[in-house]
Image (spheres, grey):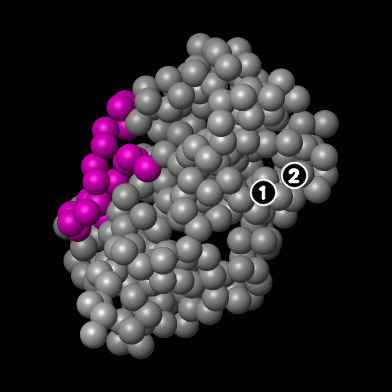
Amino acid sequence: MKPELNPSSRDSGPSIFQDTIAEMTYPEVEAAIERGAVALWSMGVIEQHGPHLPTATDVYIPSARLRAVKRLLAAQGIESIIIPPFYWGVNFVSASFPASIKVRAEVMIELVVDVIKSLAGDGVRRVFCISGHNDRAHNEAIFQAMCKGSAESEAQACFICEEAIVRRLGIDPADPAVMPFSVPPEQPPGPFLDIHAGDWETSVMLAFNPDTVRQEKLHDLAPTNLGPDDLAEWRKGFEVSRRVTPNGYFGDPAAATAERGRTSIEREAEAIVQGLVRRLA
Ligand SMILES: [Zn+2]
């Protein structure tokens, strides 16, 4: 009898290195930069995502989004290179759970700035970053790194950020270090929210990295049926968040479908590319 594979050795779908410069040679990267390629970079985190999703969910999802962005940009005649994803981010809300790795914002900012400077030294002039993780402090760190990286190098770094998060962070939407985008919701919002490791994130993982989803667990996961007041409480972080969501998810993972995951990544990528085409014109 064949020994059963442990979960981490299964074929999990596209690697986070797929389509990034990690799979290119240096002359290929050099030539792309000489042709004026823009750099795309996702900023995730290793963080608990309930009993059914892997801790790198916030790395896999923006990686899938950037692969779609790269493809759509190429169709518009815009060349891009993808930088391997950043994954040591800031955890606050999930910080009391195991495997939510906590890195200080200042460490994250300095590391991101060094990478931007390194890319600028190679000749890259535009760096566009997206977030895979909605902790406020993580996204504040990204924005600060974009400002500092742009000030200290010849590259312009820009945070492609959902409008709602730009508002929440109090960033001026006209700041060159941010490019707000929004995707109209497919359905009118109901009374309950889907925030973390719920329907949306599980759908995207089913679409792009299905073997990393513990699908046998999904049926047992009841919807959390939590609303805006619970979200405000959950955002207080650490033990408070863990009390609000003891199983680590906020939403309805059992409702997930791969098809919705694919559609939502396509719609987001289209919205991002529309913004990028305007920004690069
Ligand atoms: Zn997530």
- Give the spatial CA distance, label 2 vs label 1: 6 Å
Q: Amino acid at mark 2?
A: Leu
Residue 159: image x %, image y %? Answer: 56, 35
The one of 233 and 143 positioned closer to us in this rendering = 143
Q: Which corner quadrant of the image does residue 230 belong to?
A: bottom left
Is 75 left, or right, of 221 in this rendering?
Answer: right
Tag shown at residue 73: 2
Mainly helix, strand or loop, the magenta region? loop
Q: Quadrant of the N terminus?
A: bottom left
Image vertical order of residue 246 relative to residue 217, above or below: above
Is 235 left, or right, of 157 in this rendering?
Answer: left
Image vertical order of residue 60 relative to residue 86, above or below: below
Image vertical order of residue 125 relative to residue 166, above or below: above
Tag shown at residue 69: 1
Residue 170: image x %, image y %? Answer: 51, 37
Decide whether residue 89 is among the magenta residues: yes
Is 237 left, or right, of 172 in this rendering?
Answer: left
Image vertical order of residue 111 relative to residue 208, above or below: above
Residue 155: image x %, image y %? Answer: 60, 18
Q: Secondary structure at mark 1?
A: helix
Residue 248: image x %, image y %? Answer: 27, 67
Is 97 left, or right, of 269 in this rendering?
Answer: left
Report the residue that reaches farthest toward the bottom. Answer: 219
**Numbered-mark total:** 2
Q: Quadrant of the C terminus?
A: top right
